[in-house]
Amino acid sequence: MDRLDRKIMRTLVRQGRITNHELADAAGLSPTACARRVRLLEERGLIAGYRAELGLAAFGLGATVIVSITLERQTEDTMAAFERAIEDCAAVLWCYLMAGSDDYLACVAARDIADFERIHKEQLTRLPGVASLNSNFALRRIVGRAMPADLLGP
């Protein structure tokens, strides 16, 4: 990965909908050379994908809840069953396997507290192997980025 690759990736992180021609201009490359570099960055896994970040509030999802999850057991079967099941919970935006006191950390989007109570009762508590859930309501997002900017260098 050289300076031009980093410039391409920094531009894509800031402007994901930029055209290849605009990206090429920003990087100082021809459109063909730029497209070739982007394809190689994708193949190497440096660019993992593209997506739109939707405004949850515009869809009526005003509550973001961070849920710490502890399983009854940390066996391979228990963890695999839990991971398969949580993928089917549509309200879960992301879920991470953790090291430390909790087994998993998940982010849930809900309309409001009553909607989260429904999700908690009908989905989260029914996940296989769950011993305990600890929910924290986010007041507002301060930082939200896909990649720490300093990792891409100058």
Image: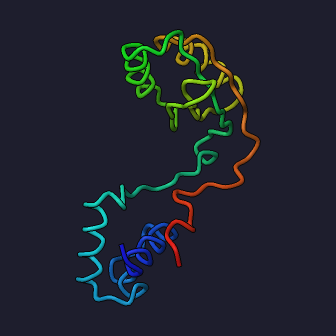
Residue lying at 59% horizontally and 45% vertically, measured from the top left: 56
**x, y (%) of residue 106?**
56, 32
Q: Is residue 47 left or right of residue 15?
A: left
Q: Is residue 102 left or right of residue 37?
A: right
**Between 34 and 90, which is closer to the camera in this rendering?**
34
Q: Is residue 140 left or right of residue 115?
A: right
Quadrant assignment, res 7 = bottom left
Where is 38 relative to 127, above or below?
below
The N terminus, quarter of image: bottom left
Please give the count of numbered marks on the rendered protein.
0
**Between 123 and 6, which is closer to the camera in this rendering?**
6
**x, y (%) of residue 47?**
36, 61
Quadrant assignment, res 29 = bottom left
Residue lying at 38% horizontally and 17% vertically, measured from the top left: 76
**x, y (%) of residue 90?**
47, 30
**x, y (%) of residue 59?**
58, 43
Where is 84 relative to 23, above or below?
above
Can you name the residue that lies furthest to the front here?
Answer: 100
Residue lying at 54% horizontally and 31% vertically, measured from the top left: 98
Q: What's the image's color scheme?
A: rainbow
**Between 73 and 107, which is closer to the camera in this rendering?**
73
Quadrant assignment, res 60 = top right
Residue lying at 56% horizontally and 61% vertically, measured from the top left: 148
Q: Is residue 76 left or right of residue 130?
A: left
